[in-house]
Image (spheres, helix red, strand yellow):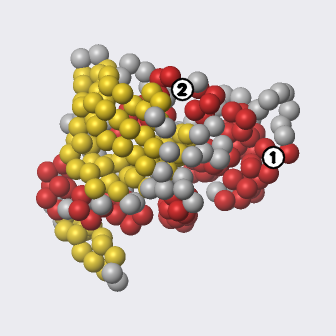
Amino acid sequence: MSYSLQHVGMRYGDREVLRDITTHFDAAQLTAIAGPNGAGKSTLIGILAGVRDGFAGVCAYAGRDIRKWPRRALARRVALVPQSLRLDFPFTAEQVVMMGRSPYSKGLFEAPGDYEAVERAMRITDVIEFRHRDFRSLSGGERQRVVLASALAQSPEFLLLDEPATYLDLKHQVAVYRLLRDMRTSGVGVVTVTHDLNTALTYADRVVLLYGGGIAADGAPAGVLTPVNLERIFGVHAIVQATHGRAWIAYEA
């Protein structure tokens, strides 16, 4: 399964956020979307997830316009991990993860397979120890891992993430991106927004750089995250060096 975008654009009032985005996102691939603040990264993820209306052009998933997908049917195939999730009611972490199974629900009660999916997702994301805690009492990083577990419980074909490592400590940042890399080897498509270019360089198969609402560069990480592009798009001086056979971006002080 894959996404196809043709001349996608988005405006908020008089401000053009995205313009003429024509690209595709394929299964079994980890694509990192990067760019300066305001470049349209979160808007693009929202369009892919079917939660942003009013855009121009065509965004299709599996050959069908995203606007024509029934919400429940799309949720069985595509999962979204937002930057943050606010809940005003006393749900436990486990209940939040169980919400990821709602697209499969056929009644008021969960099926045995739902519990198995939730248990597996919570163990993968290392949140099983606080399964009975109030979601609102968790730290930002703990909440983010619970939300990721909820998305994994959906058993998606495509996983969309908006800066999934923002609140995570180093251990869990590495764990999440290793997980995403493993998911794409099992055929799941992964598109993630990130500000950490070294993470993109290390784990992504492809990097899409957004700038001024358009695609400024697109391709293999080493060919996109070059000193020329970093200075042109981010306004920083940098060098790309190799350590133990792995490329790494170093920024000038």
Task: Give the mark nearest the N terminus, 1 or 2.
Answer: 2
- Position of 204 compared to 151: left or right? left
Q: What label sits on residue 69 in the rendered view?
A: 2
Label 1 packing within 10 angstroms: few (<14), some (14-19), many (20+): few
Q: What label sits on residue 113 in the rendered view?
A: 1
Image point (49%, 56%), residue name: 28
Q: Is residue 41 above or below residue 131?
A: above
Q: Is residue 64 above or below residue 120?
A: above
Q: Secondary structure at mark 2?
A: loop
x and y percentages locating residue 211 in the rendered image: 22, 41
> Which residue is nearer to you in this view: 106 or 98?
106
x and y percentages locating residue 153 in the rendered image: 68, 46
Residue extending furthest toward the front? 63
| Three-letter code for the amino acid on which mark 2 is drawn | Trp
Image point (20%, 45%), residue name: 216
| Three-letter code for the amino acid on which mark 1 is drawn | Gly
Please say whether residue 133 is visible from this viewpoint: no
Image point (43%, 32%), residue name: 60
> Which residue is nearer to you in this view: 119 or 253?
119
The C terminus, quarter of image: bottom left
Image point (36%, 43%), residue name: 24
Please say whether residue 76 is visible from this viewpoint: yes
Count of numbered circles in the view: 2
- Position of 72 compared to 111: left or right? left
